[in-house]
Amino acid sequence: MQRSGYTDEQINKKISRYEDSDMLYEESEDALDRLKQIRQAEVEQAKQRQEEQARQQEEQSRAFFNTVTSEINSLTNIRGIAIPKEDRKALFDYIFKVDQNGQSQYTKDFNKNLSKNLIESAYFTMKADALISGATRKGESSAAEKLRNLMRH
């Protein structure tokens, strides 16, 4: 009766009336049948929700895979660092080719030192172009200084 929306007070009144009219047993059997139907409907709804979630998850995974594949195939450089064509296939395999345990080499390498790799990845993502331009300036300054020193001698 609670599943049908009755309050505790309404349920107690109905039980009292059923007891008074010697119908409690019959009504309890009917209520049990209704409860079984309600539970079956809930199980079906839960199953449908799970199937829908699994389908959506599969679609998202497929879309992610297709996006990464497309980006790797069109990749010429990463933040100014040239990526040779032959490295694209190697990069794809490194990320996606899995062993019998379902792990890619990237996953294995990343997990070897998870906290360090997570911190480095986050920092490089956060600083991105600033790190590359800083390294470029430092390299140019170093090269120029070496040239000056060679010319002095």
Image (cartoon, helix red, strand yellow):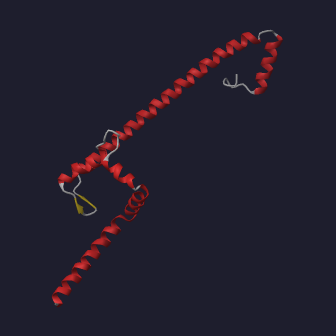
Identified at 22% across, 78% down, the residue is: 143
The reply to whether residue 76 is in sight is yes
In percent of the image, x 41 and y 33: which residue is there? 55
Quarter of the image that includes the C terminus: bottom left
Query: Which quarter of the figure has residue 117?
Result: bottom left
Q: Residue 8, relative to residue 100: is it above or below? A: above
Q: Is residue 12 left or right of residue 86?
A: right
Residue 5 drawn at (x, y percent): 69, 26
- The image position of residue 79, as x and y in percent, is 28, 62
At 44% from the left and 57% from the top, the residue drawn is: 115
Is residue 38 depicted above or below 138 in this figure? above
Picture quadrant where residue 124 is located: bottom left
In the image shown, does 124 or 10 lie closer to the viewer? 124
Which residue is the extreme one toward the bottom? 152
- Using residue 54 as the reference point, say whether residue 140 is left or right of it: left
- Would you say 111 lies left or right of 70 here? right
Across and down, in percent, residue 133 comes to 30, 70
The count of marks equals 0
Q: In which quadrant is the N terminus drawn?
A: top right
Q: Residue furthest right?
A: 20
